[in-house]
Every structure is written in C-alpha cells, then in structure tokens.
Amino acid sequence: MNRHLFCILLIVLLIAPLLSGCISSDSNDDEVDTDGDGWTDREELAAGTDPENPDTDGDGVPDPIDPNPLVAQGTTTPPPSTTEPPTTTQSPTTTSPPAGDDETWMLYEFEVGEEFTYDVSWTTSDMTLSGTLHIDVLSSSTSDYKIHYYGSYTGFLDGSFDTTFTTNRETVYDDFVTNVSNNYTMISPMFSFTILGSWWNYNFSNQQFYVGNTWSVTYDGETTTFEVTGECSHAGLNGYYGQWTYTGEDMEIGVCVSPDVPLALASEYRFGSGDSEIVYSSELVDYNS
C-alpha cells in the first residue's frame, strides 16, 4: 500500500509542472488579442469574427463596436446612389444674397501648392479615435495633381500613415476615397465622412452660400435639405455654417464652408442615436496656398 502511495505521489510530482504549464498557457491564451481590436482571440472565435482582422466585414467599424461585425454596415457608405439624376429645388428665402456675395462652392478644385491640416475624430459610446490629417497638393508630370496625405491617430488604435498618389481634376474625389479606403480601412471613415464626403457634390454644387439661403435635393424619393444659418471661421478663413439633414437615414451634418477653399473648413457628421450614435468630426487648423 505504501509502495502504491509512493508511486502515486511520484507521478503527481512529475506531471504537476506539466499540468500547471497547460493551465497557465490556457489562461494566457484567453488574453491574446492578435489584431488589437479589444476582443480577445477566444472572443473573436466565439463571435465568428477574424482574430487577425480588427474589422472582419471591412465596413470601417471595428468588430467590438459593430452591431453586426459579420455584415458590412451602411454607416460607412454615403447616401444611396441614385437610379435617376438628383433634382434640386431652391426653397423660397426671406433674404437675398448680399451684393457681390454670389460665389458658389467649387468642390475639389484644387490648385497646386495648397496645403490643408485637419484635426479629426471618431467617437462612439465605446471608444474614441482622434488624429491629424495633412493634405498637400503637389505638381505632377503625368497628371493634374500629386496628392500627398499623411498623419497619425491615437485612442482606440494608435498609428500613422503616409501616402502619395497622382490624380486628375475630374477623378480626384474618387481616387482619394479609394486610396484611403484601400490603404487605411480602419481610419478611412474619419476622412471620408467629414472631409471627402460624396454628398458635398450632390448637395452643394452650384449653390450660393449666404445666411438665410435654403435648398433641397431629392434622391429617389428621399429628400436632403440644407439651410445656411450663420457665419463661421477656421484656420483664419471665414465661411458659412449650415445644417444638412437626410430623411432616408438617421443622420445629420453640420458644415462650415468657404467659397474660396475647395474643402470644408469643418464638419460634424452624426449617424444613429443614443448608445448607437457615431460622430465623426473634422476642423481645418492650418491652410496654405
């Protein structure tokens, strides 16, 4: 009996370190977060998401805060494309444009040598991401422009970016959005929603900016309205502030623009409400031409 007890104790002493190592290893594995998105690999596997991709469905919303991380959400796409050309209606106004103040906002009409610096942010109930975006418009021997954009971001994720591409006047918007989306999927919403939004062209092309002016644009039965409510100033540039609303989605945009600058001076985009609200914002903090 004593011999048997001795053998059992010996076996226990021999395998205890191995068992301890296995237990410790499992415990550490529970804490591994390969893609750094805030969900451990074990949580990713349970949810069916990719433990090596912080945004499994590629919609720009990190898995932990995505309502459905396996299906791309509409929060990273502009208002739906139209099957018919959008129609614009100038609403009656109580004021007339001041004398000599009848300029329209010429979007993305860059001039070589322009330099923009923006503070940008992305906020939800669960996380905050903020950063800086620099855009330099350079000359190109093969195209109208060479765009150099670079910057950094901190918060839910930390990192930096630095990219250059060539483009032409008629394709600069599409090329810029595609480049940012392909290279920096996780942070592209901060730029695409506030600085490069596709709705700028549909809603503001050929419109005059002065306090009191209003207009509406209809997309396949859904109406966008805009009202210029006041004046604003950013980076030493004076502009006009207005509120933009879209009946097709629960979203609202406030934007400051100057007819003299081809990008918004500042904007704030709100999507959703309550705990599901997402807010993107940008502000021009430095400009050179």
Image (cartoon, rainbow, N blue to C red):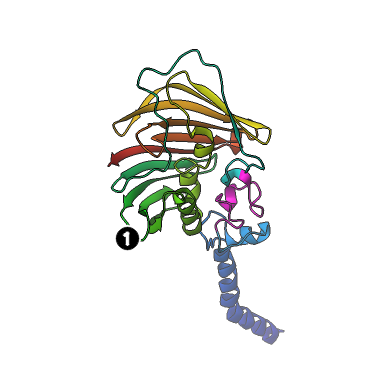
In the image, residue 258 above or below residue 147: above
Estimate the x, y position of residue 245 in percent, counting from the top left: 57, 29
Q: Is residue 140 found left or right of 175 in the rendered image? A: left
Residue at the top extreme, as displayed = 94
What amino acid type is highlighted by mark number 1?
A: Ser
Left/right of residue 108 with respect to residue 226 in the rendered view: left
Q: Give the camera-side residue of 68 and 210.
A: 210
Residue 72 is inside the magenta segment: yes
Mark 1, Cα crowd under 10 Å, few <14 / some 14-19 / many 20+, is: few
Is residue 97 in sight in this rendering? yes
Quarter holding the C terminus is top left
Residue under label 1, please give it.
141
User: Image quadrant for the N terminus?
Assistant: bottom right
Name which residue lies at 57% across and 46% down.
76
Dot 1 falls on a residue whose secondary structure is: loop
Task: Tell whether position 98 is magenta.
Answer: no
Query: Can you name the residue that lies furthest to the bottom here?
Result: 3
Chain part drawn in magenta: 54-74
Judging depth in this view, the residue of 167 and 121 nearest the camera is 167
Residue at 39% x, 58% y: name it: 166
